[in-house]
Image: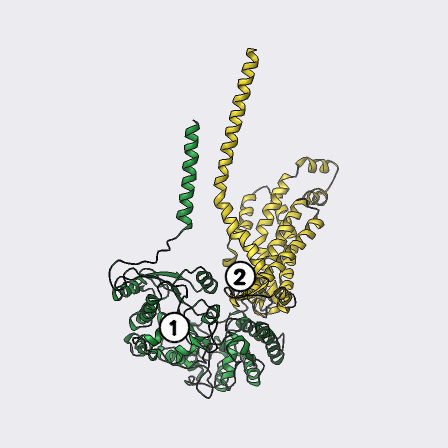
Chain colours: A yellow, B green
Amino acid sequence: MANNSIELNVKMEVEKVQSKRKDWGLKWYVFLIPSFLGILLFMVYPVFESLRLSFYQSNGTVENYIGLANFKSVLTSNSFWNSVWNTFYIGIFQIMITIPLGFIFASLINSTKRGQNFFKVLYFLPNVTSIVAAAMIFAFVLHPEMGIVNYVLHAIGLPTPGWLSDPSTSKWAVIILAVWHWIGFVIIICLANLQAIPSEMYEAARIDGASGLQQWFFITIPNMAGTFAFLLITGWIGALQRFNEVYVLGGPNGSPARSIQTMGAFIYERGFTGFEFGIASAATYIMFILILVFTFINLKFSKMKI
Amino acid sequence: MKHIRKGISLSLILMLAVMIMLTGCSSSDTSGKADGKWAGKKIKVQMIGDFKDKTATDPITGKKVKGIDVLKEEFEKQHPGASVDFILMPWEGYTEKTQAMITSNEADVYQMPGLADFAPQGVLEPLQPYIDKDKEMDLDKFIDSQVDGWKVLGKDDDKLQIYGLPFLGDARFIAYDKKLFDDWGVDYLSDHPTMKEVAEKAKKMTGKNPKTGKQNYGIWFRGDWSSAFTLIDLAEGQNGKWGEGFAWKDVKFNFNSPEMKKGLDWLLDMKNYAPKGLVSNQGSEKWLTKDNNVAIMMNQGPGDTIKPTYAQGLEDRIGIAQEFKNKDGKGGLFAGSPLAIAKSSKNKDLAWEWIKFATDEFAQKYIFEEVGAIPAIKAAKTWKSTKEMPLMQPVFEAMRSPVTPRYPWGSSQPRFTLTSEIEAALTGKRTAQQALDKAQRESTAWVENRK
């Protein structure tokens, strides 16, 4: 009887504490309100407002409903498809170069006994540099007459391209900048994965007589699949949203001759320099759909589970 | 214990609420001081450019310059009881910032270079009624063409109206380096040069400088951002025009006219006498330095020329000639910054007083002598400070003779279409005729969609 009473008391105390914790726990949601309001105001609302605007001819204040005309205008615009081409061209080459190169560098850094931290810092530094500042410096580095790149090319007897002043080379100027800026991040992510591969696997392979290259091909690379998929997806999303560096290097219309105008720059040009907010909103939604489709394809292709 | 926890949570919630109120809410108080003719009146003025709140060091000249509090003090002295506050912003992204401000009724007076884009939104107050009833405002005080240049169409207007009055002046001209002309033994540019004169002189001054042995270029022009305006001026110099109309329903482009074609051919020819990077705004880095290697600079503005020239001690080297003009003596881009009153302003009379004040000699002298911006009034020609800078006189002349009103497509899609096609021609992607035909086709299609 006494035991039952004690048990009942304990049970009641536990329920009391649990209920208090529950009450106390709910109160902490109050602290989420500011950030939640921020998300609602600056992310959720603009998403729906932009969708609404895409059906209007709007100069910011005066609006006329025009149905799907903005979408038709964007989808039939050569400039838009040119910006899609530029975005994909720069993005594909950036990813194709940076991920393999970053992985090779990460493997080399991982295999060195000394100076690992030095190399990590060295390669990661560009990634913490503002892309706007980096783009401005690259404009000097790739200056057709006074730039260090053309100086070196000239010194070794190679032709000196016009880089940003020539539509045939301007995209490559952006690719070089993008690779330089992103490679540090790729190296760090790859290194984290490399260091997580169990050493026993390499030990067993060595006992079986596998060479260093074989270990790299048959142990390292298969174990990196998840990281490659992650880099591929984040790289794609970043590449499709590219704006800052092309805006600094080529302005809103992607000079020269729209050769580096990306989808983001197209939206900026029509929205904020031309006051065509409806067109800009429609282009934003088309860009969103493109990113969605390609992310889906990437997920399927890389078999990454989310 | 329970009470303590409740107390803590209540005080935290209270603190949070106070924080949100403090950070999220700004004062919407429109009342000023208690005494005087303008008692209780307060305005907010948005200003764009190199204005400073307080006295600071100018990064170009190294001199101490007075802050905008000088204007505040004088305005409030002249208008007892009134109060003025400023919202200062840089030129970067001013269009979208202004749009955001005007949508949220943030200021009473705006410095608004994009007047032609904002007036059709119906967010600005027409100024003609204020001009008509105020004897103190004489439009003749402004340099010729400056008022006409800013006439635009409002939401329901069928003819051009005044929605803004000139505050900061601007102009486009041809600048040149007299030292390079001397080194090459070439006569300086005449005050009103022709395309032929500029081309001939540019060609003579390209190559190894006979005195210094260094590579010189005869000419430079920006092949990207402002190339559309450079080309339009070339057409104007041959009595051509960009087209006609102001409201989109009336606009007809003439981008592929024979004058435009000749102008673009001229630019293609001049490209051979210019540094390599002009399409990416490169190659003129040494301009306004002692090591300058470019003889003639097309389509220059006073903001980037006058103050740096005097700051570098290059005033004896730099000359200014006028851009190409048509048979009426008009040619070149009209530019600058007018002041406009927001329709939502609660103190429009005081806002008008600010416009009068800002376009009078006290404020105009301040913007020239302290900020280094260009005044927009005739009286400025006779100031001691402008006379001490002889380069200002051809700038005033250039301000007097641009094509007005401002090109209605100057910040719209046709400008970017034309610019991109000029770039395509300059980089060999298309011939001059193909590029201009494409610009004409696309701009016409764009404007048809706006009708």
Chain to which the residue tagged by mark 1 belongs:
B
Rate crowding at label 2 as few (under 14), some (14 to 19) or many (20 or more) other CA atoms within 10 Å.
Answer: many
In this view, the residue in front, A175 or A289, is: A289
A24 up-or-down from B172: above or below:
above
Could you tell me the amino acid type at mark 1? Answer: Leu
Q: Is residue A141 visible?
A: no
Q: Amino acid at mark 2?
A: Phe
Q: Nearer the viewer, mark 1 or mark 2?
A: 1
Q: Residues within 10 Å of mark 1 (few under 14, many from 20)?
A: some
Residue B51, horizontal then vertical, whole percent: 36, 64
Q: Which label was assigned to residue A138?
A: 2
Q: Secondary structure at mark 1?
A: loop
Report x, y in % for residue A5: 54, 14
Q: Chain of mark 2?
A: A
- Element type at mark 2: helix
Question: How far across and how far down the image is residue B444, in percent?
Answer: 59, 76
Say which of B148 and B67 sits in front.
Answer: B148
The reply to whether residue B257 is in sight is yes
Tell me which residue sits at (47%, 83%) in the image: B324
- B16 versus A68 height, above or below: above
Nearer to the camera, A240 or A95: A240
Task: Say which residue label 1 marks.
Answer: B127
Which residue occupies 62% across, 46% down?
A190
Position of A276 with respect to B358 (left or right) is right
Extreme-bottom residue of the structure: B327
